[in-house]
Image (tube, rainbow, N blue to C red):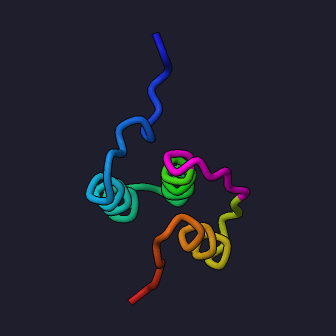
Amino acid sequence: MKDFQIEDYLNDDADIQALLNVCINEGTQEGFIECIRAIARSKSIELNLDSDFNSIRKALNSIGYKFVVI
């Protein structure tokens, strides 16, 4: 049996948005970073990602999302 990979279940932008919302609202910083990596993998993009804000912002931009803090 294949290992569970969240990116296998990201079928559209609504799925990605839901995952990001859960990670932002309920997760840890490490979980959020892993979430970004999973989204990137679903788009066949491999990311080298640090935990600082600019690295996260650039990673999200590279997969088509804009990260802003309000």
Stretch in magenta: 41-48
Classify residue 25 by image quadrant.
bottom left
Whether 41 is drawn above or below 61: the answer is above
Q: Residue at x 54, y 64 (%)?
A: 63
Q: Quadrant of the C terminus?
A: bottom left
The quarter holding residue 14 reads: bottom left
Q: Position of residue 60 (x, y in %)?
A: 54, 69
The foreground one among 53 and 36 is 36
30 up-or-down from 67: above or below: above
The overriding secondary structure of the stretch rendered in magenta is loop
Residue 43, position as x, y percentages in the image? 52, 51
Q: Residue furthest top?
A: 1
Residue at x-position 42% and y-position 38%: 6
Residue 20, x across and y down, in percent? 38, 60
Above or below: residue 19 compared with residue 3:
below
Give left or right: position of 14 versus 42. Answer: left
| Residue 33, percent from left and from top | 56, 57
Q: Is residue 46 magenta?
A: yes
- In the image, taking residue 28 as reference, residue 19 lies left or right, namely left
37 displayed left or right of 12: right
